[in-house]
Amino acid sequence: MVPEPVMNPDPSPLRDTASRSLPGLRIALHADLAPLESAWRALLPRCDCSAFQTWAWNRAWQDCIGEAQGVRPRILLLCDADGRVLGLFPLGLYRRGGLRVLAFLGDVVSDYRMPLLARDWITGVPAGAFAGLWRECLALIAEADVVLLERMPAGFDGRPNPMAALAGAEHVENAWLARLPASAEAYRAQRSRKMLADNRRNMRRLQDQGACSHTPAHAPDAADAVLAELFRQKSRRWRETGSRDLFADPAYRAFYGTLTRDELAGGLVSLCSLRAGRALVATHWGLAFRGRYYWILPGYTGGELARYSPGRLLLQAQIEWAIGQGFEVFDLTVGEEAYKKAWAGDSLPLYRWRQARTFKGHLFLYAGRLKEAARNIRWLRRGIRRLRQLRRFKQIEQLKHIQRPERPGGPHD
């Protein structure tokens, strides 16, 4: 079935222009999400994208976090000569110190960031023409000192992402995912035997503390209690590791709470848990979209029960549940944590693209490059120190062996 054409819903953008790179295309800049809801929702099925590009995700983020942080939406809408919407860039202007930063909406909570581009249109756009179009888009947003686009997938759902192919785009990190087979048995056959044996042993020991139960999809009436426990578990773990505690900020609690309230019943949001006796020992908040399950926000209890790795037990249970539900991909999202690589089978390269637009922007990028160089030098020095220590240790062991007197009767007795 051919989808109905998506028409431009807002005739009064901040600015607009005709594209020279792609004749017949118009680029319009909008400062408000609300008038674009119908176009956004209608365009989504025609695009290859993640759950982080849905209207629900971006609307909740802007309402709960973006507004609180003073982020000003700068949404670029691409339309053909007949007013049909072909693309949408969900961008915003952030204030970071005295700097005006243009970036995708969603900031730290969005693991994949990209525009919505109608697949039947973008597949016919040459790379050079797209690069020219992107320059024209930036020319409409004159307020930015610097453009920082991060966590851009190399591609999605088998199609390349033209943003990752822009000149100057850098592969800087990875996401990890498992392409799910037809059965849990087939999935386990691909994983480490030791890891699975450790999980079985930990489950037996945890069951000694109380009967264990896995709830893969909580109903809305249980959501508040599970979410409150997840906030506590995640905050504790962030503080233990010296990371920023997002949930110390009410805006982030409001964001996840709003999405849970609005989208849990419809299936976009997923809330699961592992219980031992009466205690919620592990919890998780994730997303489910187009056959892909997103493992996003896991939490687990502290104290004595943490020794049984309840978070890993919940992860395995949820993966096997996802297989039974017919999901095609279990996405552990961005991050180089060892557990993600152990449970996943594939990586997804994520790209960064940066450009200074003013003198202040150039200074900012230069300072960033100096910091990265200093970090690399520290890592190099650490590595050299460790190699030297290892070499000294081996030399000492060799000397001990040479100086050790033989036992009576010869060395082979």
Image: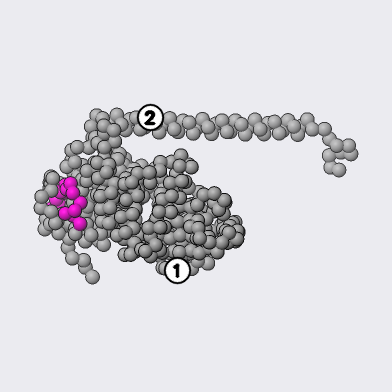
Mark drawn on residue 370: 2
Task: Say if the magenta span includes residue 286.
Answer: no
- In this view, 326 is above or below 239: below
Give coordinates of residue 132: x percent, y percent: 21, 45
Q: Measuring 26% from the left and 56% from the top, which residue is drawn there?
A: 55
Frontmost residue, 314 versus 81:
314
Callout 2 amino acid: Leu
Quadrant in the rendering for residue 96: top left
Mark drawn on residue 324: 1
Q: Earlier in the sequence, mark 2 or mark 1?
A: 1
Q: Measuring 33% from the left and 30% from the top, which residue is drawn there?
A: 366
Give coordinates of residue 292: x percent, y percent: 38, 61
* Quadrant containing the N terminus in the rendered view: bottom left
Task: Say if the magenta span includes residue 34.
Answer: yes
Span highlighted in magenta in the image: 23-37
Frontmost residue, 397 versus 220:
220
Quadrant in the rendering for residue 179: bottom left
Mark drawn on residue 153: none
